Amino acid sequence: MKRKAVYPGTFDPVTYGHIDLIKRAIKIFDTVIIAVAHNAEKEPLFSVEERIAMLKKATRGMKGVVIEDFGGLAVNYVRGKGSMVMIRGMRMLSDFEYEFQMALTNRKLAQDIETIFMMPSESYSYLSSKLIKEAHALGANVKSFVPPFVAKALAQKQR
C-alpha cells in the first residue's frame, strides 16, 4: 500500500520553511499532495494560480510531490484523495493552541483522518508567510526566507 499524505495550507507565499517540511514529508510518504487552499478570509496577496506556480517551481525535481488546489473542508479533501493523513507545520509554541484546536475539530469531523505535526529545521522555525509579507512591505530583504523567484514576485506585487 502506498503511503499518501496531504499538506494543506495557504502558502501565501511559499517559504523555505514550507519547502523544508515538504522535503521531510517526502522521506516518510510515497506521495505528498500540497493542497493550496482557496481561503478568501485570509485575503491572500497571491492568487491560487500564482501560489500553485510558485510551489511547482519550488518543488521541481522532488519525486512524489503533487500540487493542487482545494476549497471546502480539508478533511473532505484528504479523504477524497484516498489519504488518511493530513500534515500540519508546527513552528513555535504560539502555533500549538490553534493547530491543536484545529486537529481536534478535524478529528471530530473525520475520525478516519490523522493529523501529523511536523517541525521545520530550527533555522526556519520562526518563518511565516505573513511575517515575510509584512517585512517585505516595510522594505526588508527577504531573500534568505524565500526562493529568489518568490522574492521577485513579492517585489512585483508590493510596488
Image (tube, helix red, strand yellow):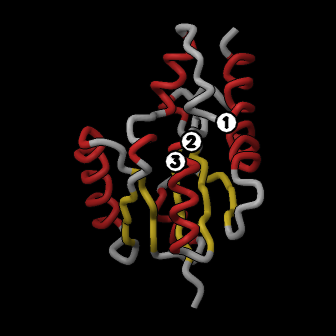
- Residue 3's place in the image compared with 99, above or below, is below
Residue denoted by label 2: 16
Question: Which residue is more in the foreground, 139 or 51?
Answer: 139
* CB atoms of marks 2 and 1 within 8 Å: yes
Q: Nearer the viewer, mark 1 or mark 3?
A: 1
User: Which comes sooner in the sequence, label 2 or label 1?
Assistant: 2
Q: Amino acid at mark 1?
A: Pro
Residue denoted by label 3: 9
Residues at marks 2 and 1, CA–CA distance in whole angstroms: 7 Å
Q: Residue at x 45, y 41 (%)?
A: 124
Q: Residue at x 53, y 51 (%)?
A: 20
User: Which comes sooner in the sequence, label 2 or label 3?
Assistant: 3
Point out the image quarter for the N terminus.
Answer: bottom right
Q: Amino acid at mark 3?
A: Gly
Q: Residues within 10 Å of mark 3 (few under 14, many from 20)?
A: many
* CB atoms of marks 2 and 3 within 8 Å: no
Residues at marks 1 and 3, CA–CA distance in whole angstroms: 18 Å
Q: Which mark is residue 147?
A: 1
Q: Which mark is residue 117?
A: none
Q: Nearer the viewer, mark 2 or mark 3?
A: 2
Q: Under tag 1, what secondary structure?
A: loop
Residue 24 percent across, percent down from the top left: 51, 62
Residues at marks 2 and 3, CA–CA distance in whole angstroms: 14 Å
Q: Under tag 2, what secondary structure?
A: helix
